[in-house]
Amino acid sequence: MALICSYCGSECSQRDQANGRCGSCACFFTGNEEIIPDAPAEQPVASSDDAASSPLTAPKPAAETAESDTEQAGSAPDTAVPPPSQFDPTAIEPDSPLQELPSSEGLIQPRRLSPQFRRRVERTWESTFGGGGAGFTAESTLSSHQPSTETKVESPTLSIATRKITKGKSGAKGASEGDYELTDVIGEGSMGRVWSARQTSLDRNVAVKVPMPELAGAGSVGESQFISEVVVTGQLEHPNIVPIYELGRDSTGIPFYSMKHVQGRPWNEFIQENTIQENLEILMKVCDAIAFAHDRNFLHRDIKPHNVMVGEFGEVSVMDWGIAVSITKDPNQPWASVATGPAGTPAYMAPEMAAHNPSELGVVSDIYLLGAVLYEIVTGTPPHPKTGDTGEALLAAAANEIIPTTRSGELVDIARRAMATNLDDRYQSVQELQDAIREYQSHRESIKLSESADEHFARAKEQQSSDEFARARFAYEEALKLWDGNTAAAIGMRLSTLEHAKNALAQENYELGISVLDSKNPEHRDLLSKLETKRAARRRLAWFSKIAAGTAIAAILTVVVVTLYFYMESLENAKSLEAERDKAREQEVVATNLKTKAEAEKENAEIARNEAFRAQREARRLEAEARLEKRRAEEAPYSSEIGLAAESIRRKLRDKAERILDKLDPTKPDADPVMSQLRHIEWGILKHSWGPSSVATLTGKDHVEAVASSAGGDVLAAGTDLGDVLVWKGINGLDNDAEPVTIRFGNKISALAVSDDGRYLAAAGIRKQDPEGDSRQNDFDVCVWEITSDGVAQSPLLLHGHKAEVLSVAFSSDATKVVTSAADRTAVVWDRITGDRLSVMADHLDPKVWSARLSPQNDDLVVTACEDGRVRVWRTTPKSGGVSEAKKLYDFRGHDGPVYAAVFSPDGQSVLSGGYDRSLLRWKLSSAQADVVAAGTELLKKRLQGQADAKQGDANERDEIGSTGDRHTASIRSIAVGRLGDQQIIVTGGNDNTVRVWRPTEASWKLDKVLSGHGRWVRSCVFSNHGQYVLSGADDGLKLWAWQDYSMPRDLIPDPEVRLSRQPSERGLSSALKSTYSRDGRWIATVYANGTVEVWDLQDPGRATGEMLVQGHAMLAATGVMDQQGERLMTSAGDNTTRLWNVTRGTHTLKLDGTGYRGAADVAWQHDQGNALVVTGSDEHMTPAWFWHVDAEGKVVKTALLGDYARAQLAQQAEAETKRRGATYSAVSLRTTDDGVDAMDRLRRRIPDVTTTKFSPDGGRFMVGDSSGHCFVFQVDAESNRPRQLVRFRAHRSAIRSAAFLPSGQSLITAGVDGEVIMWNATDGTQQNKLPWSGPVTALDVSASGDRLLVGHAPLEGTDFPLAELFRLEGEEIRPEASFLLTDDAGHRDWTDNRPTVRSARFVPGTDRALLSLFFPAKSGSERGGQSATSRPSRYRIGYWTWNHQGTDFAEMRSTQIGEVSTAFIVGNDAPQTELLVVGGKGARLLAADDQRPLSFTTLKKSFRPASKIVAADFSYDPAGGQSNRLVVGDSEGNVRVWELDAGRWSENTSAAVHLVGRHDGPIVSTFFDPYDPNRMITAERNGTWKLWRFDAEQWHSPIQSPPDADRRALNFAMFSPDGKRILAGTDSGAAVWQLEDDGTLQRVLETWQPGKVQTAVYADDGSWIVTGDGDRVVAFWDVRGNLLAQMDQEDASGTTAIALSYDRRRLVTGQGKGIGIWDTSRILEAIVAKDPSQGEAGAVAETIASSGLIKELFTLNKKLFRLDAESEVNSESDVTSISISPDGQNLLSSGMNGQTTIWEGAPLYPIAFAFSNDQFTVRRNASFKHIGRSAFLSDPSRLARFDGAELNVTIQGEPLAGEALAIRPMTDLLGATIVTDTRQGRTMLYHRAHHLAAPKLIGELTSAEGPADRLSIRFSDAVDVRSVQALITALAYRVESSTADVPRDSADVPSDSDDVPSDSAEAADPEQDAEVAEVAVISRTVQVTLSGFQYQIGDPSGATDGLPGESLPKQSLSQTITIEVEPDHNQESGQETPLAESLAAGAW
């Protein structure tokens, strides 16, 4: 009797059974092992294929005779009979019930080890280490390496050179005779001793490790383990892993390796001296190295401080990989060890390592070790005893007994979780452990900020400084952002806010105090009331001051009038007494005195009046400043309100968020009139995120396996892979925060169902019967619970009967029946009430019945889906008192592979099915049963014979749902049906991470929505809420979709990478390096570090699926064939694909999937028809080869080959299996039992696969050779192009390596791996000749004339066989002609110590040369004129072998572009030294020879490989059509690719699509299209060169490139200005701008105008600004002339890696770390307008406005802010790599290092904002024009308004005032922006110039009368935008010019010495007095500015956005008024007039 190990599958002997564990993998037996009875005594029949042995095959030892078994042969395999051993696998006693433990102690509760298990552990380690002899301590590394005579043959993939090693230093440099000189021992490890040494060839210090002598036996296991350590470490190239230099042997054969000599100290020597933070920094670097090793499939197993070396400068290196093992066995790494023996350090060891259970060993074992190191960092000691007996430490580790500690805190909790006893409780990846440590560190930062804030707060209270209060509050706020659980910061924030407000009250800064308080906070109300009272009192005082000033002026006027009255009265009296001269003289004297007195009083009155006017003017100035201060105070809270809204959304306080956002929405009645005008993109993003969502994540941390929902959606359920059932009740929307009820079911949930009425819940999986009990692995019961109003019933109904895992469960419509299917070949219908089985469906050919569903119309009908690829419909008939067997009605066979889901349509008239082949099929149930079954049987027969075509199988009456572009791109895993009203609907979920909803059409179904948001395979999906919602589950959580409202997902996850052409990876996102919008807004493109490009189409937001643009193979290319014209190329690789290429454009044209993993393929080009015939291998065992016919249009027809041969091989293998097992088995009967299915799978894998294919030269024949040595020859029919097999024969005893036809096609030469080369008759398969054996054959070629044969070989130790041989073919005779040896006659070549392998050998047509590609086992650099010393040595070489040349017969080609080589050949017959095609790596490269050096191939012409790392992308834009139809990307290898849009898809097969190779010498850093010319683009490389490209309708060429730069500064980007007329380039030392002249020349206009590094830059949309960033701490704003406008504070700009600027320049968006910052830059615009350069001196250069405080942060956007899928690992945050703003200004687009592209959607901002920040002006009469529109604010962030045809009307309200006028007065700002007028032929046209260098753009026409007037009217043109309208309003000016009559006289008429005094002079009026009264008055005027006739273009036609109007939009109008106070002119000098500022003359520009 033998046992089969459940872990490694090995047969275990009686001795192994006695030991209780497997002798191969040392895994303990669990009791579930398979028992195999002894085989019959007769000898098994040997396969004929193995009858003969290869010359290379060593004789095999005789098979050992198995010991007799006491067990009966007839015992059932599943009988629970333990092996004959005293070992009980259940000897580990169950844990005692856990008590409530504090903190994380419960995670590390030790296991109780039974005495038996303790003895097992002790014996295991004693047998390994001899009882732990002397020298072993608990801190020593223990491993099972010990002297052994057992041998292990070294892997043939490694070639180890012999090196001479000496000890001691030589006398003189260069005189040493050894390769390495060993000096001192610097350390000892578990396997060897490390020496300090000098490598003499390079004269450098290295470290050399030599194994212990007892382990170094040649061929021993110890030696193999030592070599494994070397190769493992060498494979891990990481900064924190010591690099390996060389693996070699010394002269005695002992292996050694050299590595970097790390100068430093082991970490354990100073770990206790370091601070915790210093140790954490080291630990994080160690984690980086271990995570890298895990990614490369390796475990370290010995992580401890002793094995970590810390260098002098802090560099960390993880050492000693001596016991590292592979996580899983990798056939590509035969040198890698697997866990076959115990190893580790007891003081740190994980329980599974100490107990030595390899089945549990994994990534979590290394995580345990990292946690142990962290535990030592915190507590000062390892987790297990490090002193005392080693055995005790081992037992402590096995039980996980942790040394207790009094320390507590986050770090202790993290360490305990990493060391959890239960493997599932540990961190599941190193990244999770690092994230936990980083979170701890972030809390430390929060505490530090809080402490800093305390200092500022204390200083603020002491100094009563408002600035200090502000700093304190900011620090508290930042501390809370980092950690919202920081209670000290929360208290400090509350106290500092109150104290800040009190300080503002004391300083009488009432506005500030009010702004910091919250009216809703009860603590703030009293203080807020005081501040508001004080502010109101101050406003009243200002009003009283105005009244007092008016009263004073009135009093002065009264005095003047009274004085004049008395003066006139005295004159009259003087005249009446004129008769009396004496009296008259006296009266005259009196009058004169009175006049003098009156004049004095008048002068005093004038002074008083002037003082009054000055007081008035000062009062108006103060009032204007107060208004401005008030407005700024009203604007100041905007950022606080935005931040508060964001915080409310994060905390899901929807009502509060709604109130805040409505306050900022001008369409709402309670909107703030000032702040509502300031909203921008940040408000739209918050509004959209707060608004109704179309998807909700119910859980993001659980791996969901199954989902279910009641019909009404009142009950939702999800089953997890941990065995929990999560149940939600009463979810009535996506915003519901209800917590689920958790039912602990068992270890796993595999199926789930909820009845339609929501009363019953069913679950299946591996059940757990009681909360504390162990799961019973064989218990596959289905549990059915009743759901009541109180919850879920405690006791479920059990449905017991399945013998394997239940895969599906479903209820009938009335919930009276339950149907289940399982992996036991059955489906069962149950009575839900009694739990009895009603009917069984058992006729399935494969155990896995994936799905079973009842018909909604007739619950007697059941449909099942099975792994065997068939869909069956059954009728169940009740049977009283028993179980009935269902009758099969339909057997549908149309799927190619397993079927995972099948359901009835809602009407029950058809069946829908989907599975592995990605097809969604509908089967009609109207066909007769017999017809369907018969047709399916015949179709199956033809498919097995490879004769079925697409037209067959119509009798099944099926149709495929969806077009090619609509279908899932990976397996369909789930199908559900539902009704939406009266309409039937379907939902499907697949392994492409998408959920798809389908609606019916008249004939079939059409795709309606693609729900893209999961980052993992969708396991299950159902409809809910009567079809309104879709519920879906995946490994990244559970999502609920309002699918009808769904548009674009927030997170765009690329199509899963399809690996090996079959299934996509579930997750493996590469870093997204850049995302960008197309200018037409339709497309988003993201480029990735793995060389792929994903493009999303936003035109239909409901189906936002991506298209992955990628070329080239994913694995090593093995084959390449080019046509003679050099126009087409075929490559085939080990990634299961074969690809066709257009050589001219270098683009990919077609991919053939499923062509096998060996890359065996050949092609025959039919040039006259443009067709290609391709023959390839296959990935399907039952169809070993494919024949493909590809026509000129790219249509493919493929034909299966060798199907009969595969079936015969399977039958032969089954017969051999039957004889071996001693039972009756066959290809059919082997499928009837579980173990039989596994056996069949193994047998299918043994079917030989194709190793080579070859066409005859004329394409009329081809051969196929396989791994068993069989050869098949086919004839291709000339008319139908279909193949027909001619002959099959056994050509070799080993795999066929290569083959070649002679030109006639009648003879075929084949070569086997064993070295045989034979010529055959290709018609009948008879042997014609055979070459003498000369070693293993690797390559074969026949000359074009057929007279020569070329054979390449692999080296064979101990032989002198040639590397290549040339034979003469004469008929059927083969004569040797020449040999290519390891040495040449001239002594130039000696490869005896480094023997190469010939990878390919090809004749060079028309010459006497052959092209050989060689692979050398060891890298070698320059030798005898080889590569330069600076070039990297390569193991691959290519050269010409000239066989008739005496002396030097090999000429090596020189090229740094060769790389890996599978095959190489010269292209074309006419250019033997012109072009070289090298196939290898992940594709092929076409190289051109230098004209002067024919052997130097340095020019890369074409590359047919995938991009290595794409870093740049951009879309073109065609203004004529308004479309973006080209995409350009650049990669790190200097290649540029262009795709073009063709029929809605991005194609490489159009005229403009191209792959530009070899045009750049360095990595591409940027690619940009001309913004207005799709035929022009610019590309830039890191080495300092940029090139300008133009497309001339046929090809791209580069007429212009950057001028030569002497210092070749490192270039970071080169981009066009928005008008395409300038080029901006950023380097590491500055930036420069070139002007593109009309004649095609370049003119440098700005040179290095910003000092320092310019990493990134962005132009303002109008080209007026340039914003630059250095990638670290500098973000600066510049005008186009290089003047600094503003600069962000360096602390604010810290970590900025990406920037974007809104089109109106009011917002800057930055990517900083994991967050996205939104900044207000409006103040820069205000500062630009405020500084009017026209007021300066003529010719003066305008000063800059650079100052601090102009850029204000609004808030930081990140996923943590909104908690968007915060628990989902696929949606976790990562560093932001790029930022862009959508063309409509509404959305943000970001990309991150986690591979995701995120759209931050924003609501449209309707209506646009129009206001004046200063709407009151004072104008003095006769002064120059006053700009009254200077403070205009016109904001349209969402670009909704269209102004073409609109009008601007400016009018003065009320009665006209003489001399007043309105005008357009152009004003030039600092940037040169201005309005320009042009009057010609009576028409005045208006132009806008955006900046100094911009061309004026026509924006409208002045339609009102020319010249100053009381009204202005402008009609806008089509080219106007909101910026031009605002610029025009800014140019509005007003003036009042007094007429002559209004000007007062200079002096009064004073009478002279005249006696004539009029008698009625007392009643005469004084004109001067009237004029003075008129001019004292200040006249108020009102100017109305109206925008009318503009319209909104709506971005959301659904009307979903609140406040946004519908599609039918009337013309809109906005109006604002300006108040002007006109005061008299008191300072005008006589005869002077204030000149006008500028002229409106024609042709001003």
Image (cartoon, grey):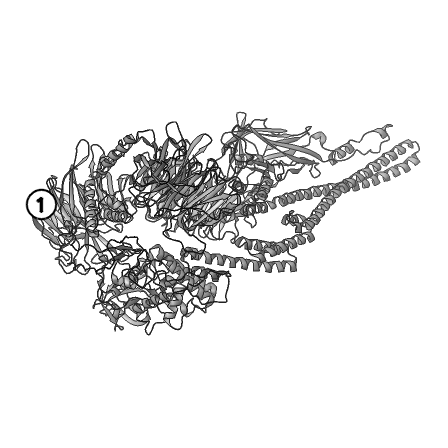
Residue 70: quarter of image: bottom left
Please state the horizontal and vertical placement of residue 1095, each as a whole percent of the image. Answer: 39, 40
Residue 1124: quarter of image: top left
Disc 1 crowd rating (10 Å Cα; few below 14, some 14-19, many 20+) is some
- Residue 1639 in view of the camera: no
Please state the horizontal and vertical placement of residue 1218, each as a whole percent of the image. Answer: 20, 49
- Residue 1368 in view of the camera: yes
The residue shown at (55%, 39%) is 1868
Residue 2025: quarter of image: top right
Residue located beneath label 1 in the image: 1327
Quadrant assignment for the N terminus = bottom left
Residue 142 appears left or right of 583: left
Please state the horizontal and vertical placement of residue 413, each as a whole percent of the image. Answer: 48, 60
Identified by mark 1, the residue type is Gln
Residue 574 appears left or right of 1982: right
| Mark 1 element type | strand
Please state the horizontal and vertical placement of residue 816, each as a whole percent of the image. Answer: 43, 38
**Relative depth, front residue between 1105 and 130:** 130
Residue 457 appears left or right of 1541: right
**Relative depth, front residue between 1789 and 1290:** 1290
Instruction: State the count of labels.
Output: 1
